[in-house]
Amino acid sequence: MDIASQAADPVISPDLLRRFDVQGPRYTSYPTADRFVEAFGPADYQLALRSRVQGAARHAGMAPLSLYVHIPFCESVCYYCACNKVITRHHERAAPYLDAIEVEIGLHTAVLGSHQPVTQLHLGGGSPTFLSDAELARLMQMLRRGFAIADGAEVSIEVDPRTADPQRLRHLADLGFNRLSFGVQDFDPDVQLAVHRVQSFDSVRALLESARELNFRSTNVDLIYGLPQQTAASFERTVAQVCALRPDRIALYAYAHLPQRFKPQRRIDAALLPAGSQKIAMLAQAIAGFGASGYSYIGMDHFALPDDPLAVAKRQGRLHRNFQGYSTQPDCDLIGLGVSSIGRVGATYSQNAKTLVEYHDALAQGQFPVVRGLALTRDDLLRRAVIMALMCQGRVEFESIALAHLIDFEKVFAAEIEALKPLQASGLVVLEPGAVEVTPLGWYFVRGVAMLFDRHFKADWARDHFSRVI
């Protein structure tokens, strides 16, 4: 169903706001990354890679991979940022980092074999466009030597508009990138000053126009609501400006103010942050504004034009969710390269060292730079299937889960089904015989619905590791 067409002016009561003004996971994975343990290390990761090879031998072929490469460098700090980053103007630091990534690629191909098929590649950061044109070309050459990037693969890169121009976009197209994501966050000058990220509307417009002329397959604009100095009125103007730019996709994230974890956020005056009721008003206005401009509400934080593959996948029930957010790619193993990158191989998650020193040291010793991870249990896999169905399709069919995992759904999840009843009374979900479906109102709080099935989160309800649900 098209949520945007059904989400006009839902009634959001103060009671609902109070109930869901809590912290919760974004569910780019389940279990979430805070559950990773240091007991999972390089040997465990190498074993997971070997198991992939053995599984391919048994099934006459290896499934395609997804690749993520983390480029941590930025020239200046954005105060809201919670990414793993290194603030520096010394561009010479990029060369040894690329040397390290080349070693890491070699460690993977030594186990997996070279030229494994790849259908999705994403460069994130930090700011990948911190790299020079020559350095980006070198990185792509390294990746193509180690892996077989398939014809028609999704090849995307995050672009800081302050570090790009039309000529640079042409270079990215020549390197094979076909999807661009522009970090905008907000066009209001006061908000930009408050978060230390100033960029003009005209510069972003020029980049999007250039991307269309260069026939990029898809463009995305990132926005954040809940930033200091934002108001419902100012953010409504930003939404209108983004609609005028007409990107293929829009990612709309709630700002998570966690200064105790992310040092740059300590420069933000908490008194300037909008209250929960103001944030939900911004979200409601954004959903209405994007819907009126023809965008489909994909769910939680993504919008797309109706003919975009993301919107098509949503209508056809083929939507997936991974560490980069919503995706059209089916569940597949993800190789994370670079400092702090997260990977998924088989029923395991892994994360690389978070500092450059640790990352370089591990590779200098010929070891995978994995410092923590998790081997999923049967219960983790079961609950992941339920949570991802809620987050992607907004619907869980009990029988399909039961057949896939050989369980009695209503028996195993009796407590969770009971806990859904108050949400049904509040209009957030509909409990049917053999299914649960999220309502248009419920999509505002879909993370809260999913949390009911999260065994780990319920065991540690008081944690402050996450952003707020609204």
Image: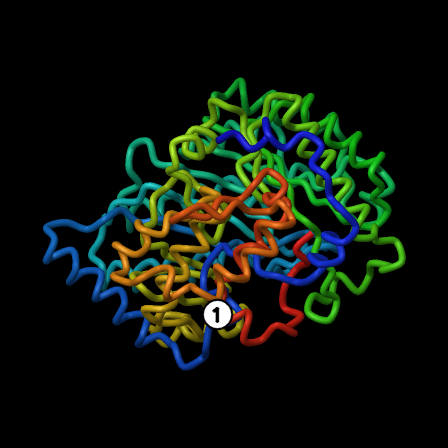
The residue shown at (41%, 74%) is 362
The residue shown at (65%, 46%) is 253
Residue 187's place in the image compared with 453, above or below, is above
Scheme by which the image is coloured: rainbow
Viewer-nearest residue: 430 or 182: 430
Amino acid type shown at disc 1: Arg
Instruction: Report how many numbered discs are placed on residues in the image.
Output: 1
- Residue 366 lies, in percent from the top left, at 33, 73
Viewer-nearest residue: 273 or 122: 273
Q: Is residue 143 left or right of residue 72?
A: left
Q: Secondary structure at mark 1?
A: helix
Which image quadrant is residue 55 in? Answer: bottom left
The residue shown at (40%, 47%) is 433
Q: Is residue 77 left or right of residue 309?
A: right
- Residue 453 lies, in percent from the top left, at 48, 62
Whether residue 92 is visible to the viewer of this picture, yes or no, is no
Q: Quick one: which residue is furthest to the top in this view?
A: 213
Number of residues whose C-alpha sits closer than 10 Å to that of mark 1, classed few (under 14), some (14–19) or many (20 or more): few
Viewer-nearest residue: 119 or 413: 413
Q: Which residue is mark 1?
A: 455
- Residue 439 lies, in percent from the top left, at 56, 41
Which image quadrant is residue 333 in? Answer: bottom left
Q: Quick one: which residue is furthest to the bottom in this view?
A: 39
Viewer-nearest residue: 257 or 181: 257
Which image quadrant is residue 81 in? Answer: bottom right
- Residue 463 lies, in percent from the top left, at 64, 73
Residue 269's place in the image compared with 144, above or below, is below
Whether residue 102 is visible to the viewer of this picture, yes or no, is yes
The residue shown at (10%, 58%) is 58
Q: Is residue 336 left or right of residue 325?
A: left
